[in-house]
Image (tube, grey):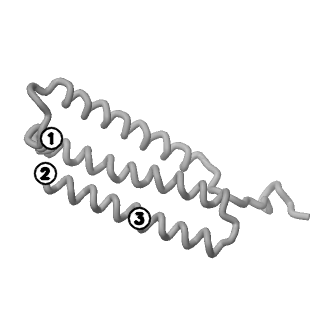
Amino acid sequence: MSVNYGSKRVVVGAHYGLRDWLSQRVTAILMALFTLALLAQVIFSKGPIGYDKWAGIFSAQWMKVLTFTVIISLAWHAWVGMREILMDYIQPVVLRLALQVFVIVWLVGCAGWGVQALWRL
């Protein structure tokens, strides 16, 4: 019988803790604030929204830095969520590891594509 208390506590499954919970909330708040800032710029802009307007919104250095931060936050938010799901529901270790590697590669690729698109504006 396994001991489930003290220093011999058996912990299985996802990473339980405040760090993951807090990182999910902080990244969600950051993404929500970014969305509100972007909506405000779109709503209060004069004239029709076209490429010139979008390029103008993202031309300021502070907006590029904020967008970069949000792209990284989105990738981190998705990683924490996917890691928790995989740790909870995929029991074979080899399959779980393969899926985790796939998720990491996918998220890094998506973040890289987003950053590249941002700096082309």
Which residue does the image show at 16% across and 43% down from the upper left? 58
Q: Amino acid at mark 2?
A: Leu
Label 3 sits on residue: 106
In the rendered structure, which amino acid carries the disc numbered 3? Trp
Q: Which mark is residue 121?
A: 2
Query: What is the three-letter code of the residue carrying label 1?
Result: Trp
Q: Which residue is mark 1?
A: 54
Residue 79 is situated, as x and y percent measured from the top left of the image, at 48, 56
Q: Looking at the image, is mark 2 or mark 3 earlier in the sequence?
A: 3
- Pick the front one: 50 or 20: 50
Q: CA distance from mark 1 to mark 2?
A: 8 Å
Residue at horizontal 48%, vertical 46%?
23
In the picture, residue 45 is in which quadrant? top left
For the residues marked 2 and 3, what is the alpha-carbon distance in whole angstroms?
Answer: 23 Å
Mark 3: secondary structure? helix
Q: Residue at x 46, y 52 (%)?
A: 78
The answer to the question of whether label 1 and label 2 lie on touching residues, with beta carbons closer than 8 A, is: yes
Q: Secondary structure at mark 1?
A: helix
10 Å crowding of disc 1: few (<14), some (14-19), many (20+): few
**Nearer-N-terminus badge (1/2):** 1
Q: Earlier in the sequence, mark 1 or mark 3?
A: 1
Point out residue 55 in the picture as x, y percentages from the top left corner. Answer: 12, 44
User: Seen from this angle, which residue lies furthest right?
Assistant: 1
Q: Tag 2, which secondary structure?
A: loop
